[in-house]
C-alpha cells in the first residue's frame, strides 16, 4: 500500500510539475507579449508625434507658397489691366512653381493605438492630405491651361479682319483674377480644416504619451458605467461621429491655443522673409 501511494505521489508530483511549467510558460509568454504590444504602441505614438509635426510644418509652408503664387497672379492681372494701347495684346505670364507637398505618413492609419478617436482622426487626415496634394498638383496644370487658352485666344483674334486686343486683355484679366480668387478661397476655407484636425491629433497624442496616458485614454474612451454599461455599447458609440465631437470639446481650448501660437510663428516667419 505504501509503495502504491509513493508511486501516485511521484506521478502527481511529476504531472503537477509539468502543469506548472506549462502555466509558467504561458504566463511568461503573456507578459512578454503584453510588453511587446506596449512597446509597439509607444513607438506608434512616437511616430505619430513626428509625422503630424512634419505634416503641420509642411502645411503652413505650402499655404504660404500658395499665398505668394496667388498674389503674383493678381499682380499680373493688374499689369494686364493697366495696358491701354488699343493694338497691344497681353501675353505676359508668371511662373507657377510646383507646390510643396504636405507630408503624409502612409503607415499612420494602420497604427494600433487602442484609441478610436486617434484612429478615426488619422484616417481623416490621411485622406485629407492626399486630396490636398492632388489639388495642389492640379493648380499648376490648370494655370498652364489658362495660359494656353490665352495664347489661343490671341491667335484667334488676330485672324479676324478687325482684331480687338481689348477683348483678349479683358478676358485674360478676368481669368487671372478668377484663378487667384479660387486659390485664396481654397486657402481660407479648406486648409484650416486640415490644420485643426492635425492639431487635434497632436494634442490628443501628446496626452497619450504622458506618464498617465493610459488613465487619460480610459477616462475619455474606456468602458465606464457613467457612459457605457458594456463594451458593445462603447463600440457602437465609437462608430458615431458624436463620440469624436465629445472628445473634440474636451481638448478644444488646447487646440485653439496651439493653432494661435502656430499662426503667430508662421506670420513672424513670413514677415522675416519679406
Image: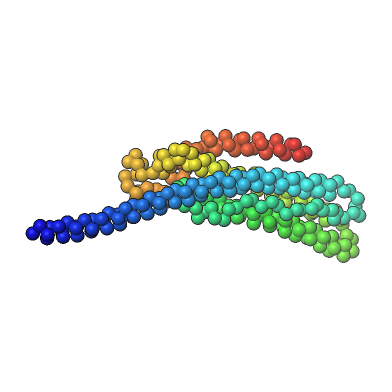
Residue 111 point in image, percent of width and height: 50, 53
Q: Is there any visible trace of residue 248 in the rendered image? A: no
Above or below — where is 21 with respect to 229?
below
Q: Is residue 188 left or right of residue 97?
A: left
Above or below — where is 259 with respect to 91?
above
Q: Report the front residue among 41 and 236.
A: 41
Q: Is residue 258 left or right of residue 222?
A: right
Of the 4 image quadrants, the one containing the N terminus is bottom left
Give me the residue at 63% from left, 38% from top. 262
Q: Is residue 9 left or right of residue 253?
A: left
Q: Residue lying furthest front in this view?
A: 3
Counting the numbered discs, the total is: 0
Give me the residue at 82% from left, 53% from top. 93
Of the 4 image quadrants, the one containing the C terminus is top right
Give me the residue at 70% from left, 44% from top. 64
Q: Is residue 89 left or right of residue 249?
A: right
Residue 264 point in image, percent of width and height: 65, 35
Give me the residue at 83% from left, 56% from top. 168
Residue 270 point in image, percent of width and height: 72, 39
Q: Is there any visible trace of residue 27 in the rendered image? A: yes
Coloring scheme used: rainbow
Above or below — where is 260 with respect to 107?
above
Q: Report the front residue among 207 and 196.
A: 207
Q: Residue lying furthest left in this view?
A: 1
Q: Report the front residue among 242 and 208.
A: 208
Q: Report the front residue among 15 and 102.
A: 15
Amino acid at each position: 500500500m505504501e509503495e502504491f501511494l509513493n508511486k501516485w505521489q511521484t506521478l502527481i508530483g511529476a504531472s503537477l510539475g509539468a502543469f506548472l511549467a506549462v502555466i509558467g510558460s504561458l504566463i511568461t509568454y503573456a507578459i512578454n507579449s503584453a510588453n511587446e504590444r506596449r512597446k509597439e504602441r509607444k513607438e506608434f505614438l512616437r511616430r505619430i508625434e513626428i509625422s503630424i509635426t512634419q505634416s503641420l510644418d509642411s502645411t503652413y509652408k505650402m499655404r504660404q507658397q500658395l499665398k505668394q503664387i496667388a498674389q503674383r497672379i493678381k499682380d499680373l492681372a493688374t499689369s494686364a489691366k493697366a495696358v491701354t494701347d488699343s493694338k497691344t495684346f497681353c501675353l505676359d505670364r508668371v511662373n507657377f512653381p510646383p507646390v510643396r507637398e504636405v507630408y503624409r505618413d502612409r503607415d499612420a492609419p494602420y497604427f494600433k493605438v487602442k484609441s478610436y478617436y486617434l484612429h478615426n482622426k488619422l484616417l481623416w487626415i490621411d485622406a485629407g492630405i492626399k486630396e490636398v496634394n492632388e489639388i495642389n498638383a492640379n493648380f499648376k496644370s490648370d494655370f498652364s491651361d489658362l495660359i494656353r487658352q490665352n495664347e489661343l485666344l490671341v491667335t484667334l483674334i488676330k485672324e479676324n479682319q478687325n482684331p480687338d486686343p481689348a477683348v483678349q486683355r479683358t478676358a485674360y484679366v478676368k481669368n487671372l483674377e478668377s484663378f487667384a480668387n479660387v486659390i485664396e478661397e481654397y486657402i481660407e476655407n479648406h486648409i484650416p480644416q486640415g490644420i485643426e484636425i492635425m492639431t487635434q491629433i497632436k494634442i490628443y497624442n501628446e496626452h497619450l504619451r504622458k506618464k498617465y496616458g493610459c488613465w487619460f485614454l480610459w477616462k475619455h474612451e474606456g468602458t465606464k458605467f457613467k457612459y457605457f454599461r458594456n463594451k458593445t455599447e462603447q463600440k457602437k458609440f465609437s462608430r458615431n461621429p458624436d463620440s469624436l465631437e465629445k472628445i473634440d470639446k474636451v481638448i478644444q481650448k488646447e487646440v485653439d491655443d496651439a493653432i494661435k501660437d502656430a499662426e503667430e510663428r508662421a506670420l513672424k516667419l513670413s514677415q522675416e522673409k519679406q
